[in-house]
Amino acid sequence: MAESIRLNPTKTFNPRIPFTNHTLPSIYSFKTKSKSKKFASISASVSSSQSQSQSQDQQRLSLDSLIGNSSRKDELFGSIRSSLPHCLSETNLHLTVPGLKSKTRGKVRDIYESGDYLVLVTTDRQSAFDRILASIPFKGQVLNETSLWWFDKTRHITANAIISSPDKNVTIAKKCSVFPVEFVVRSYVTGSTDTSLWTVYNKGVRKYCGNVLPDGLVKNQKLPANILTPTSKAADHDVPVTPDEIVQRGLMTQADYDEASRKALSLFEYGQSVALEHGLILVDTKYEFGKADDGSVLLIDEVHTPDSSRYWIAHSYEERFHSSLEPENVDKEFLRLWFKDHCNPYEDEVLPDAPEDLVCELAWRYIFLYEKITNSKFEMPRMEEPIHDRISRNVAQALSSLQ
């Protein structure tokens, strides 16, 4: 799951500093530092620096053909914008819920221990490039409910650690020994981060995480077959690793790795099938596994969320690929691209603030993806009760019933 990070007692985040032990300010303080005061065509995916010379029309990516009902977006946008000041950027349940012990603060989740259980609170924090970039309205609820849907739908492939979900942002799970390996499965040569397959391939790498890659591939091209590119979890970033290195370093036994990798590939194949039924391409994703007391390998953390996965619009992929245009995406990739176009997110000490319209667009895309995949309507949370109070009350009740 999320890596352990020393806690900072402050209650807010600062998006301008690297992801270490710091926190973000309220989202309503975000203002764009772009020279243009108007963030043009947020419904469009922001182009990478490689395609900046393309015309604005070429850069524009529309989801209208998949959305169908534009009134739904209008309806959600109003709620999203009004919720900007109320994002869940930090929790302190160990101070409000009896019996909760230590708090581990990950990039997105706050994790608490309670006996044989873990309480995972999915916040609205948005991370990329090993930093917190912003807080996105309703993001935590979307991720939590998306994962719960997939956990339920994939029980025929693997058991998982889920016990219950007492709150829209909370999952209670069995405590298990987490393997320090992320199982990243890929179907396309793409990405913009330092560890993305396109980045390393474009640098000339042809053997990556134990996979031999053919010459002549271009960005966003489909691979001949799905591949597994595992990473070992370091303190503040993930490090690509081969299957042999995983076993040699003692990160996993050969038997555990074989079982987890087999499950990861099966989960991905199933996820691709479901996504395609809904007009989407599941491009790549990551899985995490843990070992229960009885020795079983369990799926943990999150499944096929827009945070852990890359999704493209299926019907336009081929045409855009052959026109050397970026695929239409429904995940956080366009946020990554915006930051890469406006700064060096790995080296700059201070990053530009994410424009408010960009934040709202990402919130909408996350909700859209949830509704498209699950074929259900996203329920806006009631705002009469402060969200932290609501979570504290629901978690306290759930834990008392488990005793």
Image (cartoon, grey):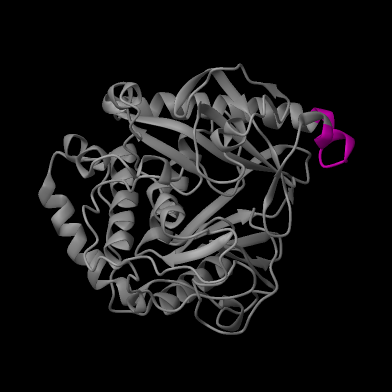
Residue 120, percent from left and from top: 56, 61
User: Which residue occupies 46% across, 75% down?
Assistant: 393
**Looking at the image, residue 243 lies above or below residue 287:** above
**Observer-nearest of 397 and 140:** 140
User: Which residue occupies 28% across, 22% down?
Assistant: 319
**Observer-nearest of 188 and 398:** 188
Q: Can residue 123 be seen in this snapshot?
A: no
Residue 35, percent from left and from top: 29, 67
**Looking at the image, residue 264 lies above or below residue 287:** above
**Observer-nearest of 292 and 106:** 106
**Observer-nearest of 215 and 78:** 215
User: Which residue occupies 60% across, 45% down?
Assistant: 194
Q: Is residue 200 left or right of residue 256?
A: left
Q: Place residue 232 in its image quadrant.
A: top right
Is-magenta flag for residue 251? yes
In which quadrant is the C terminus drawn? bottom right
Is-magenta flag for residue 155? no
Q: Is residue 155 left or right of residue 2?
A: left
Q: Can residue 392 be seen in this snapshot?
A: yes
Residue 151, percent from left and from top: 50, 41
Specify start and end residues of the magenta stretch as a single range: 245-255
Residue 14, percent from left and from top: 51, 76
